[in-house]
Amino acid sequence: MSDLQITGGRLIDPANGVDEVTDLFLSGGAVAGVGKKPKNFSAAQCIDAAGMLVLPGVIDLCARLQPGEAHASGAGATIAGETRAAAAGGITRLLCPPDTAPVADTPAVARMIQDRAAAGGGARVHPLGALTVGLRGERLADMALLMDAGCAGVGNAQTAVGNTLVMRRAMQYAATYNLPVFVRACDPWLQGNGVAHEGEISTRFGLPAIPEAAETAGVARDLALIETSGARAHFDLISTARAVEMIAEARERGLAVSAGVAVHQLHFNEGDIGAFDPRYKVFPPLRTENDRRALLRGLEENAIGAICSDHQPHDADAKLAPFVEAAPGISGLDTLLSMTLELAERGELRLATAVAALTSGPAAVIGMDAGHLARGAPADVCVFDPAREWTLDENAMQSSGKNSPWLGRKLRGRAAATIIGGEIAHLDGAPVTER
Amino acid sequence: MNRDIQFDDAGKLRHFLTVDGMSRETLTGILDTAESFVTVGEREIKKVPLLRGKTVVNLFFEPSTRTRTTFEIAGKRLSADVINLNAARMSVTKGESILDTVRTLEAMHTDLFVVRDSASGAAHLIAKHLPPHVRVINAGDGRHAHPTQAMLDMFTIRRVKGKIEGLKVAIIGDLLHSRVARSQIHALKTLGAAEIRAVGPRTLIPTEIETLGVAATSDMEKGLRGVDVVMMLRLQRERMDGQLVPSEREYFNRYGLTEEKLRHAAPDATVMHPGPINRGLEISSGVADGPRSVILEQVTNGIAVRMSIMATIMGGSEERI
């Protein structure tokens, strides 16, 4: 592995308190030094990052790599293709939830996902193993074997475990192996067949509603279980102010809980659905403006540690249906980094908070030495050009799923180079000199 | 909020999908035009040539007798060729798409679709994906809207009361699942009703109904006190599973409209119901068939109002009658 030098960029490494214009030296797949050139370092390649941000590679804790089963036409997203799309978006590592087809509840499926991802040559992929067999919420999956097969944690994807006793035992069992449990806090009966937040929009447009209480009840139940099981738990997609409050309080009490939020929850509220725009159909649903602001505050106050894409690439027909029946989800690999940093640009989030929520925050959730750029850390880096203006059109989008509410929008800032394990995995605009 | 697809670039009405967002002038214009169509039904030859040569498809993905029939009669009285399709629809996940069906029919040069579907937003979806010269009327989409029903209700109120402005109206029953109620609320607001009350148990009233400009109460007596118009809603028997209301008996006891309860309304209060009626569940036979009831007039008026809406969006004007 040859040495790579990134010079003159503004290095932002929140985990190590760094925000300065400096040089970064990568060698042997790891960070070899910051600022001062290490001994015996001889760069084969040099990236000129003047005017750009040099960030730890983005870690996305929730990205599906295949289209929903119901709409798979065979022409859509593939694991390999989506990992390359992730790299193009500055993402160097991602976690894939276990609701794959077939479900990641056996070591064989977990390995297959990693093999296919490795063939893609893009972002590193860690599967999440299923918490219960078939995600049915009845029997515990082989969690230890899933961990041995490379799973970074376990979870039940979008299907909440309805039986509280099963959930308790699943947490206790995961705690045995110190496996992080990814929790989608939602009371399944309160969610029912709902498709939109219970509020003004669901009332006006007659959409089956999901009350805030679905999430409140889910978080409350699972916090009670976390407290007594000793599990490390991550509420991976929260959407309400109440959830932020409850999780902040639990963290203050010292519980090993963390929380994440999808970037679209930080940009949109229920009103964006308008007259049935299916691009805004997501689970959990877009909530109120008050919730959106509380999520942003939760990030600043460290109740929420991670922003993810909740990437769900769909074929075009998946959204060509009445809102109630349209497939939920947004294709988000292309926009996770740009749209998160846009929040900083707009002053809704501090830049350090935004970068941390994409890097060191998610690394902490899975307990991995990654997401920062101190000496010895993995050489996963994103060089981001904040001045680059581009339009998110179907050609510019690297994911096979074009289901983005930002489609057609002008964006500012884009990954100019993505380095994974010391190698340039994606290059788009950063000048490189070979030596 | 998205641009309202009901209007073309020149601001002319081209689809009739929801009353929400329409101006008072537009609604009044439709009601005025409907007046001129009432007499057509009373003539010996009940036809005008406004839509001659046009093809109207009644595309009903959900069963209906009354609405579909009145649309059929309305279309025929305007001299259109009317085709009725009662299509069963599988959910999209099983591989059949509502848009496939519509596009197939559009390829046969349909000029106007009258659509009913169990999914909120279905009519919007169809309107969005058809070429601009094809028109869509929403004959009921899920819980969202039933705008032609609301317009015939407004027409009926106007004929009985002379005006809508200043009236106090109670809407009673299952507002949560009701597309009729949502459309009635928007129409009543736009046409200047003084007060709209939503009456029912809390399980049947949407949590944020006030955002529509409605006052909610669970007290039938309070809800009825002094109102000029009582609009009953149909309570679907399949919802009587003990989770939204305990039993038919208890529901009728509290919210069934009887002559006794009706005494709390204004002495000349009008009673309406979109039909079909569940006698003994939401309304007593005495009230439904009594002197205050205009339930059958609503049905008759439905034809003139639907003619008016069809003619308006197809570009016909009343001078050509």
Image (cartoon, rainbow, N blue to C red):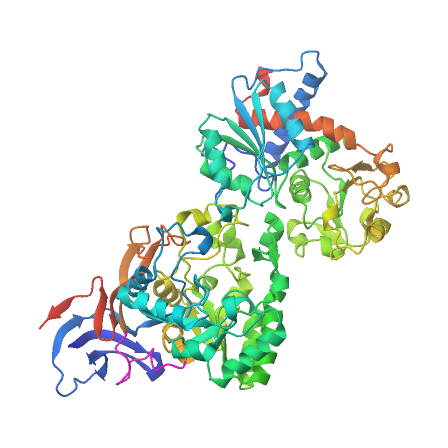
Tell me if I can see residue B33 in this picture: no
The magenta span reads A367-380
Quadrant position of residue A126: bottom left
Task: State left or right for residue A176 relative to residue B144.
Answer: left
Asked if the magenta segment contains residue A372, the reply would be yes
Residue, x 63% and y 62% (percent of image)?
A: A190
- In the image, is residue A60 above or below residue B306? below
* Along the line of sight, the residue nearer the viewer: B82 or A140: A140
Task: State left or right for residue A34 relative to residue A320.
Answer: left
Where in the figure is residue A409, as x and y percent of width and height?
Answer: 36, 52
Identity of the residue furthest to the bottom in this view: A39
Residue, x 57% and y 23% (percent of image)?
A: B82
- In the image, is residue B69 above or below residue B236? above
Task: State left or right for residue A417 relative to residue B46.
Answer: left
* Along the line of sight, the residue nearer the viewer: B270 or B72: B72
- In the image, is residue A255 above or below residue A293? below
Quadrant position of residue B307: top right
Q: Work out which quarter of the rendered image holds the C terminus of chain B and state it.
A: top right
Task: State left or right for residue A301 relative to residue A197.
Answer: left
